[in-house]
Amino acid sequence: MTDTAPLRPDPWSVTTADVTTPEALELLREYYYDVANRYYRLHLGREGTPEQLESGLAGSPSDDLVAPDGLFLIGRHDGVAHSCAGLRRFDTTTVELTRVYVRPGLRGTGGGARLLAAVDEAARSLGADRIVLDTRLDLVEACALYLRHGYHEIPAYSSGPYAEVWYAKELTVRA
């Protein structure tokens, strides 16, 4: 006879949220500081200054992540907000995924997978049958997450200064 512990309920849940709430803005600031500081460390050998980070954050608004052509998701671990993602309409059948973030201390706990599953459902709710995104190659955790969850590399569809690799995922129709 084997001892089996009862299964613990999934500590992650994901819901849509208002991108202008303090909770959402805190996650977006952490997301931006994380990706910007990685860039500064890689290319300049230092952290970004508070002025550089705040200026960059101000120049990267998320106000398009609202209905009717976008939305914002917050992932909670044991009820506390620890991850986020945004979707914006790209064309009539495609949405663009952006602002994907899981706090570093909770990476590897299933939060990214739960977030991307919710992204798929949210994209369908916007009438999309395809999701696209661009990212940087140094964001290796993100690239690996996308590839594990059905995304594949595609030709460039955008020309942003930090876009180095582009991915897409075709959504299956749910019956």
Image: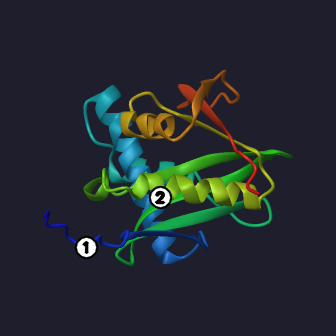
Query: Compared with residue 158, is residue 106 higher up or lower down, i.e. above or below?
Result: below
Q: Quadrant of residue 38?
A: top left
Q: Say what secondary structure mark 2 lies in.
A: helix
Q: Toward the viewer: 65 or 146?
A: 146
Q: For mark 1, does the 10 Å Cα neighbourhood hold few (<14), some (14 to 19), or many (20 or more) residues? A: few
Query: Quadrant of the rendered structure where residue 31 is?
Result: bottom left
Q: Quadrant of the N terminus?
A: bottom left
| Amino acid type at mark 2 | Arg
> What residue would you read off at disc 1?
6
Q: Residue 146 at what x, y percent from top left?
A: 50, 39
Is the residue under label 2 in contact with that under label 1 (CB below 8 Å)?
A: no
Q: Is residue 54 visible?
A: no
Residue extending furthest right? 92
Point out the tag, 1 or 2, that comes first from the N-terminus. Answer: 1
| Rendered view: 154 above or below 168 | above
Residue that appears at 57% across and 60% down: 118
Q: Nearer the viewer, residue 9 or 79?
A: 9
